[in-house]
């Protein structure tokens, strides 16, 4: 499963990071765009249509694990 992420610098990597509202909105937007990609673009990313749709259907609060550390 592919995960999309928002890059952000951190002063201290040990501090737990909660996804901000802007992060969640951005992730939701990226997931919607992923669902609209054509087969060639998905193939370039190594994803199937099923994987893209599964990712796009995830709720906004279902963030990648590396966001939660």
Image: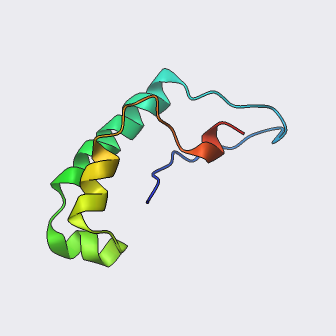
Left or right side of 14 for 36? left
**Residue 37 location in percent, x, y?**
19, 60
Give the residue at x 64% y 46%: 66
Give the residue at x 38% y 29%: 25
Q: From the viewer's side, name the closer residue of 19 and 57.
A: 57
**Residue 55 location in percent, x, y?**
34, 49
Q: Quadrant of the N terminus?
A: bottom left
**Residue 2 location in percent, x, y?**
44, 59
Give the residue at x 35% y 75%: 46
Q: In the image as oriented, which residue stretches furthest toward the top?
A: 21
Location of residue 41 (image quadrant): bottom left
Is residue 8 at all visible to an observer of this figure?
A: no
Image color mode:
rainbow
Residue 12, relative to residue 7: is it above or below? above
Give the residue at x 24% y 49%: 33
Left or right side of 50 for 16? right
Q: From the viewer's side, name the closer residue of 42 and 25.
A: 42
Q: Quadrant of the C terminus?
A: top right
Location of residue 14 (image quadrant): top right
Left or right side of 30 for 9? right
Is residue 62 at all visible to an observer of this figure?
A: yes
**Residue 61 location in percent, x, y?**
46, 28
Number of numbered discs: 0
């Amino acid at each position: 499963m592919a995960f999309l992420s928002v890059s952000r610098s951190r002063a201290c990597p040990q501090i737990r990071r909660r996804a901000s509202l802007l992060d969640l909105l951005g992730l939701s937007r990226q997931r919607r765009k992923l669902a609209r990609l054509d087969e060639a673009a998905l193939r370039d990313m190594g994803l199937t249509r099923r994987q893209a749709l599964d990712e796009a259907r995830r709720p906004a609060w279902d963030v990648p694990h590396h966001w939660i550390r």
